[in-house]
Image (cartoon, grey):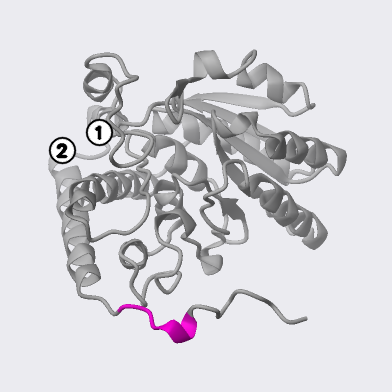
Amino acid sequence: MQQSPDQIRRAYRQMRLIREFEERLHVENPKGEIAGFTHLYSGQEAIAVGVCENLRDTDYIISTHRGHGHCLARGCDPKGMMHEIYGRADGLGKGRGGSMHIADLDKGMLGANGIVGGGQPIAVGAAVACKARQDGSVSVSFTGDGASNQGTVFEAMNMAVVLKLPKVFVLENNGYSEHTGASYGIGGDLKTRTEGFGIPVWEADGFDYFSVYDAAGEAIEHARAGKGPSAILATATRYFGHFEGDPQNYRAKDEVKNFRETKDALKRIREKVTGAGIFTAEDLDSIDAEVLKLIDDSVGTARNGPVPGADIMMSDVYVDY
């Protein structure tokens, strides 16, 4: 699909924002100022951005425990996210959710989810709402290769087909379910298994923004057109461990180094757009500098942000009908 320079600039900035946000958390996390588990998305930026750049304001997404990249790609405020991760009262969830439970309903971001595969039924519910409104909106869920083995995912796929919902399943195969290789942990393969439910699957190179963008555009249009659910299978890798502190002893020597050198999504998009004369390296460098300043500012204010008081701990837990 043809994209304007403004669209490409935005996509590059979003990818750089995710990368620098996560790389900075990798530095800050060992300092002991961040509570709870942190799961970083570095390496998979092209998937989140390639999908979300096809979405409208009325669409929904729901994420996983590795959710920072999806949140940023959907347009969630990076400063509000950083404050949330630091447990501050002015974070997106008032400091109560932390890394694994960031949500922003105003952005159509229905939440990261600490339960493996737990987002799929929620995304199906959102797809029911989309269908009822008849406004062409869609519900998109992100699922890792490990979570794809959960019964909740199978049930969600089946219900989406039965109800012919505008639901898009994004399957992110980063090669590992925690510490178990996908080649060992998945019976068959993700594409044919998903097709077995009657869901068409578009495959994409998860290291290539343009590949993901094109595949996502077709899959999302399929759902928008009332043809039922669709799926995107994108293969990439994560640069860091399953969680911060994971020594990654299950990975081959220099595995991550080789990915960073030969398949990195940021390097690829820079090479393509500068090679095509769309932007110069200096143009992209200025975006990088602006993003780095934003991250620095976000960390600085998060460190000194207000801590939530006990009075808000039970707010927003129950809804009265």
Q: Residues within 10 Å of mark 1 (few under 14, many from 20)?
A: some
For the C terminus, which image quadrant? bottom right
- Compared with 101, 229 (above or below) is above
> Dot 2, how many residues are within 10 Å of its Cα: few (below 14), some (14-19), or many (20+)?
few
The answer to whether mark 1 and mark 2 are in CB contact below 8 A is yes
Q: Secondary structure at mark 1?
A: helix
Q: Residue 28: where, in percent of width, then height? A: 20, 53
For the record, the magenta segment spans 307-312
Residue 165 at x, y percent in the picture = 78, 45
Q: Is residue 7 left or right of residue 230?
A: left
The residue where tag 1 is placed is: 270
Question: Looking at the picture, which amino acid does disc 2 mark?
Answer: Ala
- Residue shown at the point (74%, 41%) measured from the top left: 156
Residue at the right extreme of this rendering: 162
Residue on which disc 2 sits: 281
Residue nearer the viewer, 266 or 313: 313
For residue 91: magenta? Answer: no
Does residue 316 appear left or right of residue 10 in this picture? right
